Amino acid sequence: MHDKFFQTARMNMVKNQILPNNVKNKALIESFSTIQKEIFVPEDQYDLVYTDSEIKISKNRNLMKTFVIAKMLDRCNFNIDDKVLIIGCLTGYSIAILSKMVNYVVGIDNEKEIIDMASKNINKLNILNCSIFYKKDLSQGLSRNAPYDKIFIEGSVKSVPAPIIKQLKDDGEIFVTLKNQNYVGDFVRGLKIESNLSIEKCFNTNVKDKMELII
């Protein structure tokens, strides 16, 4: 496979998967149009890179379908002044997407091999407005760079741990899929008000167990 093939496939992904799902943010669409997703997936998964499939990254972790993560990020209302924490950043694809839209992105994950891949990928694209860290316990977030304007959890959780809420600015927002039963979850926006979260449901989404973050 060569660059021209991937470029055509990437534009088809935007046209046939992202736009039909009512994604409106122009900067977000531009990021998905230009960021080379193939950099962030294993070579043995290249056949799936721009399809509407989940992509296996490690034994228990998948990269979400692109149109699903696009719908999620579209609801996050990112702006150019935001400092954002991504929990469960995998190989860095979401970091690269947001790097074009916000002031600074911090990514954490709890698998060292994945973190090494993410750092390599981000360096390859010469993205400078981000940092990536290994954190064994994702429930603790990353206090060293707090407070954050927004936090995005890339995966599903049963509840948002208190240390993560604490790392949001006052009136900061957290976006996450809250898992309820079976494989069904609700992608929600949580607004921090006096150390608590006011939860607003955005849409239903199906998240497989192996995508769930144990935090």
Image: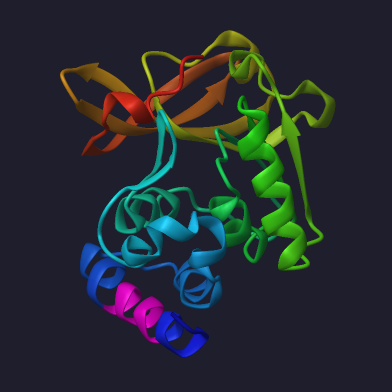
Question: How many callouts does the rendering have?
Answer: 0
Residue 130 higher or lower than 28, as above or below = above
Which residue appears at 70% of the width and 35% of the height? 148
Taking the image as shown, residue 203 lies to the left or right of residue 34, namely left
Taking the image as shown, residue 33 lies to the left or right of residue 117, namely left
Q: Which sits in the foreground, 66 or 23?
A: 66
Q: Is residue 10 magenta?
A: yes
Q: Residue furthest top?
A: 162
Where residue 56 appears, x then y in whole percent? 38, 44
Which residue appears at 29% of the width and 21% of the height? 179
Taking the image as shown, residue 163 lies to the left or right of residue 183, namely right
Q: Is residue 80 visible?
A: yes
Q: Main secondary structure of the magenta part?
A: helix
Which residue appears at 50% of the width and 76% of the height? 30
Residue 207 higher or lower than 126, as above or below = above
Q: Quadrant of the N terminus?
A: bottom left
Where residue 118 appears, x then y in whole percent? 66, 48
Where residue 11 appears, x then y in whole percent? 37, 82
Q: Is residue 25 magenta?
A: no
Q: Is residue 81 visible?
A: no
Q: How is the image coloured?
A: rainbow
Q: Residue furthest bottom?
A: 4
Which quarter of the picture shows residue 193? top right
Taking the image as shown, residue 92 lies to the left or right of residue 81, namely left
Q: Which sits in the foreground, 3 or 147?
A: 3
Q: Which sits in the foreground, 5 or 192?
A: 5
Q: Residue furthest front?
A: 44
Which residue appears at 49% of the width and 55% of the height? 41
Residue 39 higher or lower than 165, as above or below = below
Where residue 202 appears, x then y in whole percent? 29, 40
Which portion, as a residue range, is magenta? 8-15
